[in-house]
Image (cartoon, grey):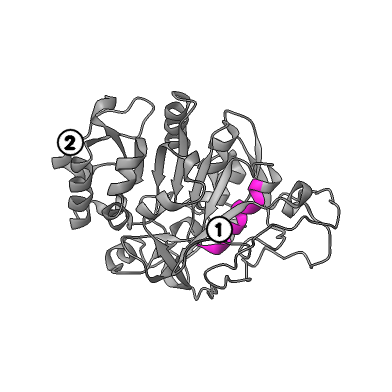
Amino acid sequence: MNEEAVTKTPSSKTSKPDKVPNEVKSVPNEVKSIPNEVKSVPNEVKPVQKEVKSVPNEAKSVPKGETSDCRGKNGKYASVYSFGPKGWQENKEVCDQCFNFPNTTLKTPFGNTPIFIYEGKNDVWVSTEIQNKGTFESSKANLMYKILKEDKEMNLLDIGSNLGVYALSAAKLGRKVLAVEALARNLQHICSSVVAGQLQDSVFLVHNAVSNDHTEVSLGVDKNNMGGTFVDVDADHIKKLKLGRAQGSYGKIHTVTMDDILTLPIIDKFQKVFIKMDIEGFEARAVQKASNLFKKIKIVGFVMEWEFHKGMKTADTIFEFMKENKFKPYSVSYNPSPLVIAQSANWPYDVLWLPESKR
């Protein structure tokens, strides 16, 4: 998959800050070397597709043969799975290099942990805010923390994980996390953060785009916004809302459905979950193949980005699914309040869905 993006000059997003934050200064982080010998992983399976070795300009791969902590203590990798024509396979390729990404500290209520980010010029919203504040989308994060803390058996399904802010935070709380991310370079950042924070036993990764079928899709570029990467299928409305920043392609990736998650080898760790979904307007397609997941796993709550569905037919698809599964909409706040479906065109940027029995 070729992830070299063709881009032009960006413009601001109406729902994001008008000013572009100052460029992120990378915070060097000295790492201790580990023994050259790395334990082999039995029954290694080749990944479904060849992953791109290219990374953003600010990231340099460490030459093979040099020691690095990127593989963790005793050579323990972050666990990555990919779904393709042959089903689920462990992906030993996407994160098998050592990357010298900029890094800083993610501040969570459960302790700090290293997080690897982009230079500010390449990711003007998420990386910059993490660098400046040590967190991102704190109101949504605080709601997630509150719900997760209500039940020690509840874990996190993070669909559209980006740099892993929610995944890493939930892992620091002591919960298991399944983080799904389509863009290889984002996944490489998460892998680096997971290993640096010694969270390999808590965070499990999936490298796929989530949809309602099995195919290959192109990933569209949101100029200078790595978290704005989108599936470029029937995406005219999404591109319009990106105000000219949708420029180019990162290449193709296999899709997976939410129901496919039920067949993951590690699914036994995720029998009760909170779902966070941010996949840039593809949420409606994702829920179209999620009925079995909702039947067989206890879904305690589901927060999704709503911006791309305001006044669109995709909203009706989501309403129908949530009604069928007896979920109702609420505001994303520490004390959620009910939302009126008739006013959904004016709902806020994100929406929380809770089971009727919950409220």
The residue drawn where x is 59% and y is 56% is 120
* Main SS of residues in magenta: helix
Q: Is residue 271 left or right of residue 169?
A: left
Give the distance between the C-alpha atoms of the residues marked 2 and 1, in whole angstroms: 35 Å
Which stretch is magenta? 183-194
In terms of secondary structure, where does tag 2 sit? loop
| Residue with the mark numbered 1 | 186
Q: Is residue 38 above or below residue 251?
A: above
Give how far across and how far down residue 161 sits, in percent. 49, 50
- Where is residue 279? Give x, y as percent: 39, 55
Q: Residues within 10 Å of mark 1 (few under 14, many from 20)?
A: many
Which residue is nearer to you in this view: 81 or 13? 81
Q: Which residue is identified by label 2?
A: 340
Mark found first going from the N terminus, 2 or 1: 1
Residue closest to the far left = 342
Amino acid type indicated by mark 2? Val
Q: Is residue 213 above or below residue 341?
A: below
Q: Is residue 145 magenta?
A: no
Task: Judge by depth and name the residue closer to the eye, 200 or 309.
Answer: 200
Q: Position of residue 299 (x, y in %)?
A: 35, 37
